[in-house]
Image: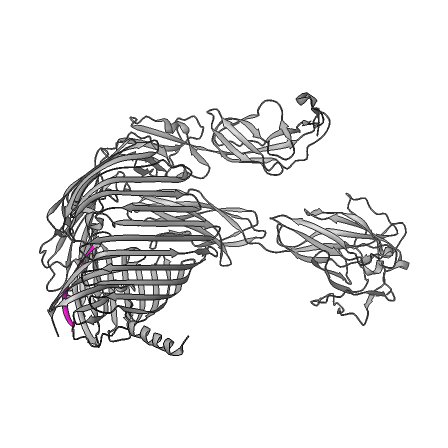
């Protein structure tokens, strides 16, 4: 029964310096206090307290306590007791030994002590001994835990007031877990007693800060689909904070993709998990390839968690249920008087029959002389370069525009018209080229012949190359080379490669060599290259000699990048050229929104040309920042540098121009499903004659992929250049629209105004280009599928598809170079011929599911495949400390321990034990397992006894927790004074 | 240090660090057919037009446009020109294709209406170099 208590009012604020915590003790007049402690004797009624005039602490109005910031402790002076009856209301917890009142005494109603606290910390609170007890002899205290509080340290004791310890507070230390709920919670009661009687108690309250924290997990980390598909993505958001939170979820997808279900907000209690789904539509004109998706959870504008997934857009089964060849045919025309003659193009990409794939392009201008390649490029038409390429998983043959890069010292960038062939399997490689020199619409005399054969050896590669190359398309080049080379298997992350070749070129011959060291790990990348190629770029190399080094190292949020290069070359185009450069570019990720970069770089070159020699030397530093919040992004930077140029002409004094260079630039934009919008500004100022315009300002606006009028898409761009001198400013404008028409036709109209361009389509005129294109999907795979199959839910785990076991859509299936996706019935087809086995990409399965291992055992000749999907089970293993024959129970922290679950095929799954000995296997596939334990690293020697525990995981069934007793391990004590070897050791329990 | 020697040094340095182009009689204004070939590190070419619109005290400015072919790709390029005449037969100018702040430096000898020379551009992607010619189509 609760009684009214009137004692008085007092407040304390002090800094518990010893404990490092700020505490508050307040005595108030309360009515019906929940845990008031009082005695019944009216004669011992408590007296109200008054504040001495010299105190710095205000009198407290219990209804509206004032903020107190004083550091001095108030003292109490008993005053005349009001006529108020106090009833007993002692509520000592049963778990404690009650401090029995020896005699009726006055009970104090003491105000709680409250302190701020953070989860995952030990909060120390100092509770002063009530002043009313300081004159009554030593004070005993008892700290009683409340709720789930975990208190550390002494829970009872005596404050020897009579021995000068009056100022010693009672220290309460509460260990708060990571999930300690936000808000005020009572963690303890401190009962004070004196002379055997409980005199009062103080509630210890902690005001736990709210922590926003979340985890996100995706149902699949790989998704598959076709252009035009609607793809669901399930995700699980767990509120790992300590309070109910409103979490915002958004999806990062390519601009212009339609998304339903994001952005959204979810209200989730602390510790709870919400299962949500977002759906995205792959645009019907999406290309084949991999797309990166991101799901981000945020609260209060701050990102808390992110999960990424890849979406593989595969060749189109969406339209007709089988693989297809995409054929685009179109016509484009530049609508000016001189250049309106149309240009035709046909391109095709996709699978053919019997595992063959093809790609090809044919483009022809009706009047090559008047065709305007600059304007046509705006609608994706590039003159020249028609080709046809057919291939399978291990080979590809190309006719028409083709080319090949053999190696750094046996020939780079040999392009022409002719034929090429490449082969690569697990054992051999081969590349052959035969062509006449040609680039774009230009060709020259000469020839391009070469062959390279190689063999994979134990993870490495060895090969030989022979080339005979000569062309004069842009600059005269000539090389006859024969070389051998190889690459080592990776060891400790390092790969070594090198090549030696004899090179004959127009003006001589010599031995060339190249060497490269690569090292890659999660946090480091390092590459060192060096080569000597006599003849240089005029003999199909990058330079006559070259050295470059690149390194990157990641330390937490800091990424350090550095590079250096040195090269020399010589040919009749410019005489000799020597260039050097270096850069150091640290980048710091402040958080998931903001990154800071610093880029210091320098470069220099010197040329001995036909006119004379000239050179340049530049050093600059750029500091920049980039940020993104939701769909918005921004970046900016400041650059400062120093440039000098030299010119040395025959019979003239050397000329040196030097000066500074400064710049500032910024860009901001938004990438949304309604398009991309961006604005940018930059300004550069440089000294005269050092290779930069004295002043240049650029203002730009851009909108891209903006949907209008149904499925039409618009882009627009404006650039304004200002040079502030004799050079007039220029405004570039470009507008375009792509309009889908009936019958799979697309109309593209692009208009540009570019005063910087000259010629028939430049200057101060608007130049429109129109393209009409038809897209045709030709079914090629439905009647030529080499493998048909289904992925289904094997509910009973028998490995056979039974009635009612549904197909699983959206599963990515791979075989060799071919990738496909199951349709809504779980069906799939594969069309390429390959000796490789089929496999399911398990990251594309619903979370917790795995493929039946038997599905990986199909023979290459199998034409029908049924792959069962099993639900995995979560299994918890609990190591239970158990007494041995002596009765000793080990007290042990199990954290370094490891528990292995071994299936009947010998596959091993491992789980770490936590401090309590609990190990959790999150996803064990169906099977029979036995456990073994690695406990040798546990600090306290323990062991298990008896046969290894076994258990069975059945599809869809729950496995009860497995309890394994562990015992203290007998310890052998070595006696160094006993020299009789092992026999001298004593044996016993440690 | 003798102050007079120091002053002389400064004056001497000032002499050698300035480019006196004002005395050149070379006039380059006009429209030029431009053809540049890149020979290192790979081959490519640009063909187009240079328009030198103004020249004063040897300093000239204008614009360039054309198309660049590399591999199987042809792309449009355009941008301003800034440069100076070094003497009566030599020019030194930069073309800022696609408004790249890094200029492509051209140093060439001019004989009547033809300039021939070398060009170099250096930047983050490395150093590129080659030769070029330009023939004046129309003059001042």
Q: Is residue B36 magenta?
A: yes
Please, is residue A971 above or below residue B67 in the view? above
Q: Is residue A534 magenta?
A: no
Q: Quadrant of the C terminus of chain A?
A: top right
Instruction: Choose between B24 and A360: the one closer to the eye.
Output: B24
Look at 12% across and 46% down and name the residue there.
Answer: A446
Instruction: Choose between A686 and A569: the one closer to the eye.
Output: A569
**Percent position (x, y) of residue A731?**
25, 70
Residue furthest front as drawn: B2
Determine which quarter of the picture holds residue A355: top left
Determine which quarter of the picture holds residue B108: bottom left
Please, is residue A638 above or below residue A936 in the view? below
**Percent position (x, y) of residue A7?**
82, 62
Look at 89% across and 53% down and name the residue there.
Answer: A104
Q: Is residue A419 visible?
A: no
Please give left or right for residue B55 compared with residue A701 in the image.
left
Give the magenta-colored segment's residue range.
B27-38
Please, is residue B53 above or below residue A2 in the view? below
Please give left or right for residue B135 compared with residue A57 in the image.
left
**Percent position (x, y) of residue A904?**
48, 24
Q: Main secondary structure of the magenta part?
A: strand
Look at 53% across and 32% down and name the residue there.
Answer: A958
């Amino acid at each position: 029964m609760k009684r009214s208590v009137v004692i008085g009012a007092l407040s304390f604020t002090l800094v518990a310096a010893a404990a490092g915590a700020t505490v508050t003790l307040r005595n108030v007049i309360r009515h019906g206090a929940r845990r008031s402690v009082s005695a019944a004797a009216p004669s011992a009624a408590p007296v109200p307290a008054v504040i001495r005039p010299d105190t710095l602490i205000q009198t407290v109005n219990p209804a509206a306590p004032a903020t107190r910031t004083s550091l001095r402790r108030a003292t109490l002076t008993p005053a005349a007791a009001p006529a108020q009856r106090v009833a007993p209301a002692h509520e000592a917890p049963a778990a404690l030994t009650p401090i029995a009142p020896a005699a009726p005494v006055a009970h104090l109603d003491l105000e709680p002590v409250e302190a701020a606290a953070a989860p995952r910390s030990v909060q120390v609170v100092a509770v002063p001994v009530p002043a009313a007890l300081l004159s009554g002899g030593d004070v005993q205290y008892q700290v009683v835990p409340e709720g789930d509080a975990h208190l550390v340290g002494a829970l009872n004791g005596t404050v020897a007031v009579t021995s000068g310890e009056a100022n010693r507070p009672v220290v309460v230390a509460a260990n708060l877990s990571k999930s300690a709920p936000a808000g005020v919670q009572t963690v303890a009661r401190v009962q004070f007693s004196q002379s055997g009687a409980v005199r009062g108690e103080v509630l210890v309250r902690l005001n736990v800060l709210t922590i926003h924290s979340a985890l996100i997990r995706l149902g699949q980390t790989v998704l598959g689909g076709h252009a035009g598909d609607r793809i669901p993505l399930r995700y699980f958001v767990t509120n790992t904070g300590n309070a109910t939170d409103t979490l915002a979820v958004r999806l990062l997808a390519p601009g212009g993709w339609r998304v339903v279900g994001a952005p959204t907000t979810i209200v989730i209690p602390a510790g709870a998990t919400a299962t949500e789904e977002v759906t995205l539509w792959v645009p019907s004109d999406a290309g084949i390839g991999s797309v990166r998706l991101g799901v981000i959870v945020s609260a209060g504008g701050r990102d808390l968690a992110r999960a990424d997934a890849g979406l593989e857009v595969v060749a189109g089964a969406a339209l007709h249920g089988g693989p297809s060849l995409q054929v685009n045919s179109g016509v484009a025309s530049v609508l000016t008087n001189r250049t309106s003659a149309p240009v035709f193009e046909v391109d095709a990409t996709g699978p053919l029959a019997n595992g063959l794939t093809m790609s090809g392009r044919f483009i022809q201008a009706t009047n090559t002389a008047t065709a305007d390649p600059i304007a046509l490029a705006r609608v994706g038409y590039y003159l020249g370069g028609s080709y046809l390429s057919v291939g399978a998983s291990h080979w590809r043959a190309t006719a028409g525009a083709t080319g090949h890069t053999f190696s750094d010292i046996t020939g780079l960038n040999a392009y022409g018209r002719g034929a090429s062939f490449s082969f690569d399997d697990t054992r051999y490689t081969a590349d052959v080229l035969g062509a006449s020199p040609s680039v774009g619409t230009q060709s020259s005399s000469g020839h391009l012949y070469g062959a390279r054969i190689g063999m994979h050896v134990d993870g490495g590669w060895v090969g030989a190359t022979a080339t005979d190359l000569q062309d004069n398309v842009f600059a005269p080049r000539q090389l006859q080379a024969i070389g051998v080379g190889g690459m080592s298997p990776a060891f400790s992350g390092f790969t070594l490669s090198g090549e030696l070749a004899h090179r004959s070129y127009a003006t001589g011959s010599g031995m060339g060599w190249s060497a490269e060291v690569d090292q890659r790990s999660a946090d480091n990348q390092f590459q060192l290259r060096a080569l000597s190629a006599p003849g240089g770029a005029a003999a199909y190399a990058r330079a006559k000699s070259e050295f470059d080094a690149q390194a990157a190292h990641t330390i937490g949020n800091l990424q350090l990048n550095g590079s250096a290069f040195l090269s020399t070359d010589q040919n009749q185009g410019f005489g000799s050229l020597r260039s050097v450069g270096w850069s150091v570019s640290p980048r710091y990720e402040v958080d998931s929104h903001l990154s800071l970069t610093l880029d210091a770089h320098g470069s220099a070159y010197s040329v001995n040309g036909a006119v004379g020699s000239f050179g340049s030397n530049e050093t600059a530093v750029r500091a920049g920042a980039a940020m993104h919040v939701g769909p918005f992004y921004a970046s900016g930077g400041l650059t400062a540098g120093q440039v000098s140029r030299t010119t040395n002409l025959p019979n003239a004094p050397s000329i040196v121009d030097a000066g500074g260079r400064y710049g500032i630039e910024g860009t901001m934009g938004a990438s949304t499903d309604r398009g991309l919008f961006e604005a940018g500004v930059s300004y550069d100022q440089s000294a005269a004659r050092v290779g930069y315009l004295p002043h240049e300002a650029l203002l730009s606006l851009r909108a891209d992929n903006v949907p209008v009028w149904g499925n039409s898409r618009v882009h627009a761009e404006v650039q304004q250049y200002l040079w502030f001198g004799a050079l007039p400013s220029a405004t570039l404008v470009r507008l375009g629209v792509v309009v889908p028409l009936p019958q799979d036709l697309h109309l593209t109209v692009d208009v540009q105004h570019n005063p910087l361009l000259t010629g028939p389509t430049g200057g101060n005129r608007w130049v429109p280009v129109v393209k009409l294109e038809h897209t045709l999907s030709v079914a090629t795979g439905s009647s030529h599928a080499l493998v048909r199959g289904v992925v289904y839910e094997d509910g009973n785990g028998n490995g056979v598809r039974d009635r009612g076991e549904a197909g699983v859509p959206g599963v990515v299936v791979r075989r060799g170079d071919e990738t496909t996706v199951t349709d809504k019935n779980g069906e799939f087809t594969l069309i390429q011929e390959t000796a490789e086995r089929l496999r399911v990409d398990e990251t594309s399965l619903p979370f917790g599911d795995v493929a039946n291992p038997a599905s990986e055992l199909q023979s290459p000749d199998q034409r029908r495949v049924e792959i069962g999907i099993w639900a995995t089970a979560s299994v918890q293993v609990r190591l239970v400390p158990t007494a041995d024959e002596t009765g000793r129970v080990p007290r042990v922290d199990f954290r370094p321990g490891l528990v292995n679950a071994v299936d009947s095929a010998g596959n091993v799954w491992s789980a770490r034990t936590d401090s309590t000995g609990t190990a959790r296997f999150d996803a064990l596939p169906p099977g029979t397992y036995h456990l073994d334990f690695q406990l040798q690293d546990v600090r306290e020697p323990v062991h298990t006894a008896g046969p290894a525990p076994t258990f069975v995981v059945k599809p869809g069934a729950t496995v009860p927790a497995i309890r394994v007793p562990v015992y203290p391990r007998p310890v052998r004590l070595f006696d160094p004074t006993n020299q009789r070897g092992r026999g001298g050791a004593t044996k016993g329990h440690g | 240090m003798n102050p007079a020697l120091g002053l002389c040094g400064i004056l001497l340095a000032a002499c050698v660090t300035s480019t006196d182009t004002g005395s050149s009689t070379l006039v380059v204004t006009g429209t030029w057919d431009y053809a540049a070939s890149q020979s290192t590190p790979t081959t490519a070419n640009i063909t187009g037009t240079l328009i030198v619109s103004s020249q004063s005290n040897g300093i000239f400015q204008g614009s360039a446009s054309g198309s660049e072919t590399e591999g199987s790709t042809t792309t449009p390029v355009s941008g301003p020109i800034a440069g100076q005449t070094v003497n009566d037969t030599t020019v030194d100018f930069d073309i800022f294709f696609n408004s790249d702040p890094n200029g492509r430096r051209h140093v060439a000898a001019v004989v009547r209406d033809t300039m021939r020379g070398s060009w170099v551009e250096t930047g983050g992607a490395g150093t590129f170099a080659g030769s070029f010619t330009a023939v004046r189509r129309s003059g001042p």
